[in-house]
Amino acid sequence: MKILLTGAAGFIGFHTALALLERGDEVIGLDNFNAYYDPSLKEARAKKLSEKKGFRMIRGDILDRETLREAMKGVDRVCHLAALAGVRYAFEHPDEYIDINIRGFFQVLDEVRIQKIPGLIYASSSSVYGGNDTLPSGEADRTDNQLSLYGMNKKDNELMAHTYHHLYGIPVTGLRFFTVYGPYGRPDMALFLFTDAILRGQPMQIFGEGKMQRDFTYIDDIAAGIVASIDKNYPEEVFNLGSGRQEQLMDFVAMIEKCCGKEGQKVFLPMQPGDVRASLADIAKAKRMLGYEPKTTIQDGIPRFVAWYRQYDGI
């Protein structure tokens, strides 16, 4: 297949591109290499992708309709992963989130309609579950109790996709990702921040007094779920992609310390606005309809990240 992958220089986009290329697909990457975090990491991912047969990178923005139109010509699927990610950055930059995550999504969706692309797979998030206190979270659970602008963005994407499917018959699949981690991960995520702090002998800021629980999902499992969604290309579905396991945050920290070979300095802080105390995915639907089978535990995944980080940062 020929696939347009937006956000190809991002964390999840990079690994998804690798998985698609590995099996022989042609991938057109579209990324604007913005400065939400250090663009040098995005450049490193792009460089690795450029060495693979069947890959082409377009440096451009989903908000530029002409660029998007040209990038989408002749593709069999659009996998839309470009977005401003994370909950906290939105507090200071709400306008960017509206532009990129909502207007940008509309541009992609509408161009899929115009060009009659036979399938759109897009990134949603576990953040859509907001303040729900029922765990594990299932796709049929309430998603109208948002705690963050980012969660609202992703719910809006799901509603927009549903409406376009209803009006124009576009096949759309939304994927609710749960706390993704692994090599080449984002520098603003906990695993990167904690590893960096421990190895540099600096204090870790641990929010929620360390009492949070998360469904940590390894990147290779996420990429496999995305590829399966591209292949299945259901008329309209939403799937949770998580590990289906809940970990205590401090167990996660302890595993990072073990891999780094030393204990880190800890500063315990209250919960941050927009954050949730616990997450856990019900992945029964993804298992049944996508053949999704996450395999990587934190005992396997964290050592892989720390090994990558040491090489990447020279520590």
Image (cartoon, rainbow, N blue to C red):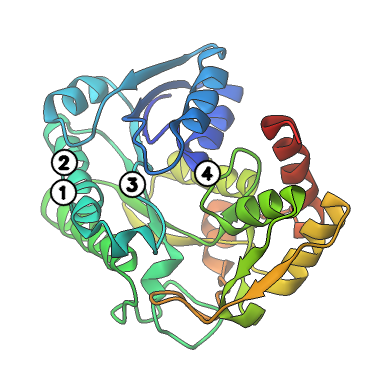
- Residue drawn at x 43%, y 85% is 132
Disc 3 marks a residue whose amino acid type is Ala
Residue 103 numbered tag: 1
The percent position of residue 234, horizontal first and vertical second, equals 38, 50
Residue position marked by numbered label 3 in the rendering: 83
Check disc 3: other Cα within 10 Å, few if <14, some if 14-19, many if 20+. Answer: many
Image marks 3 and 2: residues in contact by CB distance under 8 Å? no
Check disc 2: other Cα within 10 Å, few if <14, some if 14-19, many if 20+. Answer: some
Say if residue 114 shows up in the picture.
Answer: yes
Disc 2 marks a residue whose amino acid type is Gln
- Residue drawn at x 51%, y 40% is 11
Residue occupying the far bottom of the picture: 133
- Find numbered disc 4 in the image and state the secondary structure of the residue it sits on: helix
Q: CA distance from mark 1 to mark 3?
A: 11 Å
Image marks 1 and 2: residues in contact by CB distance under 8 Å? yes
Image marks 2 and 4: residues in contact by CB distance under 8 Å? no
- Frontmost of labels 4 and 3 is 3
Q: CA distance from mark 1 to mark 4?
A: 27 Å
Sequence-first tag of 1 and 4: 1
Disc 4 marks a residue whose amino acid type is Ala
Say if residue 292 shows up in the picture.
Answer: no
Residue position marked by numbered label 4 in the rendering: 228
